[in-house]
Image: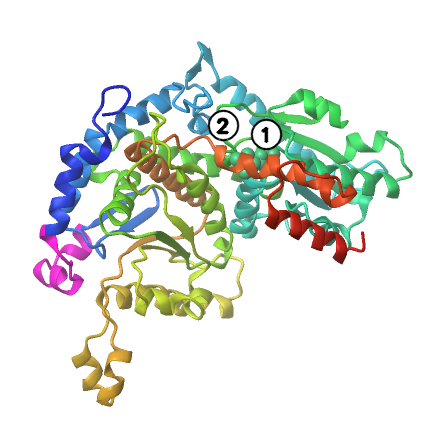
Amino acid sequence: MNADGRTRLDQIPEWTALAKHREELGDVRLREVFAADPDRGTAYTLRVGDLYIDYSKHLVTDETLRLLRELASATDVFGLRDAMFRGERINTTEDRAVLHTALRAPRDAVIEVDGENVVPGVHEVLDKMAAFADRVRSGEWTGHTGKRIRTVVNVGIGGSDLGPAMAYEALRAYTDRDLTVRFVSNVDGADLHEALRDLDPAETLFIIASKTFTTIETVTNATSARTWLLNALGGEEAAVAQHFVALSTNAEKVADFGIDTANMFEFWDWVGGRYSYDSAIGLSLMIAIGPDRFREMLDGFRLVDEHFRTAPAESNVPLLLGLLGVWYGNFLGAQSHAVLPYSHYLSKFTAYLQQLDMESNGKYVGRDGREVRWQTGPVVWGTPGTNGQHAYYQLIHQGTKLIPADFIGFAEPVAELSEDLKAQHDLLMANFFAQTQALAFGKTPDEVRAEGVPEELVPHKTFKGDHPTTTILARELTPSVLGQLVALYEHKVFVQGAIWDIDSFDQWGVELGKVLARRVEPALTEGAGVPGLDASTQALVATYRELRGR
Ligand code: F6P
């Protein structure tokens, strides 16, 4: 029993029914299920917005899907979803509402937190961002010496970096090519050094992005950036106002840092860091692609929000993707999930999803405060597919691990490519289709023999197949499609957290390392003793000091 009297997840009948079904089902052979149902390739598909989702190559039957939906119903996924959309404080360990969906709500929507409609505030900030972005893009906003801004440097980490960095890369083709955006996140001074070494300070705008404005990496890099700027511009403090803006929920800390709060773009504690790039945290992206494109992206988010909120369970794509992950993680023993985009522009997409998914669902304590007895979030990994094919796909095809994977691809190359380069797109997509085919259906020993392969090599050249994949296909990677994709994954993560009965919106697990780093730092710099330092770390610190000649 849970503390609140509910039966624990792994004891409810819907869970045990799935465990029994898994036993009875045995190994699903995709060749067989496709042979038995010639319509499977079209029947096991869904559409949401511009996305076509093929889930036919999964190790599931109609019965599996039915039982998974019953699990969703028994765990009241849609009830929690509605509570989230209503602005209830479903992030219980931080006592906060979870309202990233309000960031893309239309102007006339009413979403209340503690009796106050938050939507007008969202649009006020969006309008302020748009006005600022337009001024920078047009050259009206200049640096301290009157020069036009040519480079924007976003300084932030985690959710204050990965989202805008991913989206800037994804939407490169929509950016103003006369402006460049760089992203600095690592407290390793090399990151800032490499970002700034060829820049003219007079043409550089820093965006300091930090929800809390207390994150040590960001504050340290921001301080160094300010020193770099002031050294170059004659030390005039007034220069800071023209070259630094802040994105934060913490006006007091922003002012303490020396940034005029008139140049601060606000967001709210009901926006989680990893769910924030469509808030003020997206300012660098908005400057790059312009306010209209940014709003198109928000429309894409909203489209999937509405789908998640209203589509019935049978055709609800985030629900389906979440349930498939539960099937593999909890009933087939999968430990990881690969996301493999066949688009160079999505090169940072999986890194972004790592925080979204792993910081949200990497929890071993349930909402009732007790340790869970079931697997929670998977290890999420992957890079653009074609490169992966020549690196780690071997393990997916012939290794010993079950690795469900999402393949994301587009029918059209981006418009600005030359005709020659556009011609390469079919080859890229031929790989995209061939890989999911090979993963699903493999190659039998007989097929290998028929090619004249010597008997001793037959086992090596046999592909067992039955490696499950979801294919997500869209016509083109537009701002709206990017918004749709991100919202799809946001809600998939939500579904899984709801089923696993964990709080997907806190991140206490990253706190300990932060606290210990502060404690260890004086030992490195001053050789100060750290009370309670373990023997291994003690010796490592001593060796570090020795190597640095201290
Ligand atoms: O990694 C922990 C974390 O708190 C993330 O959740 C967050 O996105 C990141 O640090 C940065 O936090 P902030 O935006 O407050 O600087």
Give residue 271's mark. 2
Left or right: 356 as drawn, with respect to 218: left
Seen from the viewer's position, the closer of residues 108 and 87 is 87
Task: Indicate yes or no: mark 2 CB to ligand 1 under 8 Å.
Answer: no
Mark earlier in primary sequence (1, 2): 1
Q: Secondary structure at mark 1?
A: loop
Is residue 502 positioned above or below 456 on the image?
A: above
Gap in angstroms between the C-alphas marked 1 and 2: 9 Å
Instruction: Name the image quarter holding the N terminus.
Output: top left
Q: x%, y% of residue 126?
A: 56, 27
- Mark yes or no: residue 259 visible: no
Residue 368 magenta: no
Q: Does the segment drawn in magenta span residue 36? A: yes
Mark carried by residue 211: 1
Q: How is the image coloured?
A: rainbow
- Frontmost residue, 430 versus 83: 83
For the point 71% across and 51% down, which residue is it? 542
Residues in magenta, as a range = 24-43
